[in-house]
Amino acid sequence: MVNAKVLLLESERTNAPSFAPALEKRGYQVAIEHSAQTAVKHLHTVEPDLVVLDAASLKTSGARICRLLRASLNGTPIVLV
C-alpha cells in the first residue's frame, strides 16, 4: 500500500515511546489520537487503511476500545499492541 493512512491510537504521555516515527519513516501517513472517543469522531475524516491501537501505552487490555472501533469501521483492520 503506497501512502496508506494509519490511525494510531496511543497515550499522549511524553515518556511513552511512539510508533509514529517508525511508521512515517516507512512512508505511511499517520494520524494520532489519544482517546477512543476522539478516534471514533475522526474515523470518517481520516478514513484510515489501518488502525494501530497501542493498548500498552494506554494501560488497558484494549478489548473494549477494539469493540468500540470495530463497530465504527467497515472492515478496516485493527492491530492491537
Image (cartoon, grey):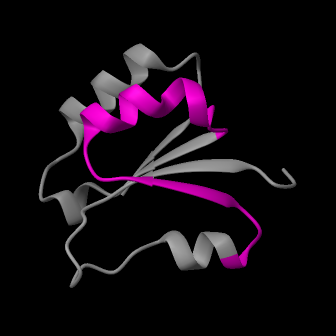
Q: Is residue 42 above or below residue 60?
A: above
Residue extending furthest toward the left: 59
Residue extending furthest toward the right: 2
Total numbered badges shown on the rendered structure: 0
Q: Is residue 59 left or right of residue 11?
A: left
Q: Is residue 68 left or right of residue 60?
A: right
The residue depicted at 50 percent of the width and 29 percent of the height is 43
- Residue 28, image x and y in percent? 71, 61
The C terminus lies in quadrant? bottom left
Q: Quadrant of residue 47?
A: top right
The residue depicted at 58 percent of the width and 30 percent of the height is 45
Report the magenta residues as a range: 25-49
Q: Is residue 43 left or right of residue 64?
A: right
Q: Is residue 14 above or below residue 41?
A: below
- Which one is nearer the viewer's eye here, 40 or 56? 40
Q: Is residue 58 above or below residue 20?
A: above
Inspect the magenta stretch and tell me whether residue 32 lies in it: yes
The residue depicted at 56 percent of the width and 24 percent of the height is 44
- Residue 10, image x and y in percent? 32, 58
The residue depicted at 59 percent of the width and 58 percent of the height is 30
- Residue 73, image x and y in percent? 51, 20
Q: Quadrant of residue 38?
A: top left
- Residue 13, image x and y in percent? 19, 73
